[in-house]
Image (cartoon, grey):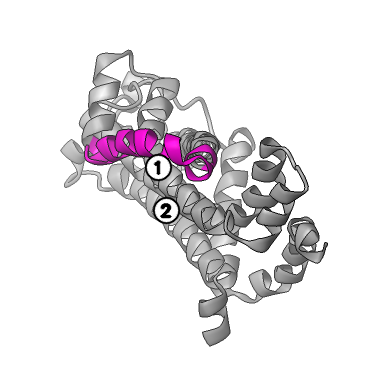
Amino acid sequence: MNSLASPSAAPAAARRRLPAFLANPSVLVGGLLVLTLVLMALAAPLLGTVDPSRIEPGMRLKPPSGLAWFGTDLFGRDVYSRAVYGARSSILIGLCVAATSLSIGVAIGLVTGYFRWVDAIVMRVMDGLMAIPTFLLAIALVSLTRASIATVIVALTIPEIPRVVRLVRSVVLTVREEPFVEAAISVGTSTPKILLRHILPSTYAPLMVLGTYICASAILIEAGLSFLGTGLPPEIPSWGNMISEGRTFFQVAPRLVFLPSLFLALTVLGINLLGDGLRDTLDPRIAKRM
């Protein structure tokens, strides 16, 4: 009976791990960076910004001033405002890609790992998707449709699903042989209940870590796509768009590239630090050494 109750102890275990999370410098620094950038994106209208898409031909390439803290770009748009509003696009895409790929990947991975006859078919499809480079697949998908935030999210989600499926499948293959799962089967527990109540909680820790890396990867790839002109349309503030437009004037006005690059680097750094801290805290072997 104790083994059957073990999955329900997950919330209590999470509460016990909270002090360990807060004691990890990577979790603290990364979490504070990410939280600061998210709050900045949400509070963009309150941070002294103006309309990031407003074009002022008479204000082209103006240096920093009280009206434009980081100057203006080649269209007279406020660089600071575009960088702050660009955080909304990047963080939204990163979170949506992570959430969507995790949701779809978990569903497929649970079924694939539990039913052996499904495994042989689904995993060959996943292997085929993983054989295609993520960046090239994203470029191809975006190029075939109209550029938009939704298109970019779909294009970045598809390559990430196989990685989630393989992770969840590997956990399911191990957990389904555990005594508490066998006990649940022996007492006639339905398959959906076994998957959701007894097996799914075992995937939470690795999925939390993988989700942070997917989010950071999606933000970087979106910036790369926008830099190449195959990502978000120019009218949507994006760090990749800003870097692409500012590279022509880098020697004259390096601030056009510096500010969006700084925000991009801090965002990815914060998410990666958070992921590293979660991995170190949730992995018993690493936590024991620490």
| Residue at the disc numbered 1 | 219
Label 2: state its secondary structure.
helix
Q: Main secondary structure of the magenta part?
A: helix
In the rendered structure, which segment of residues is drawn in magenta? 110-135
Is the C terminus in the top left, top right, bottom left or bottom right quadrant?
bottom right
Is residue 262 positioned above or below 65 on the image? Answer: below
In the image, 258 versus 165, the foreground residue is: 165
Magenta includes 121? yes
x%, y% of residue 276?
Answer: 48, 66
Is residue 140 positioned above or below 119 on the image? Answer: above
Q: Is residue 146 left or right of residue 1?
A: left
Is the N terminus in the top left, top right, bottom left or bottom right quadrant?
bottom right
| Residue at the disc numbered 2 | 268
Magenta includes 267? no
For image coordinates 28% across by 23% down, the residue present is 141
Q: Is residue 201 left or right of residue 84?
A: right
Mark 1 and mark 2: span between their CA atoms? 7 Å
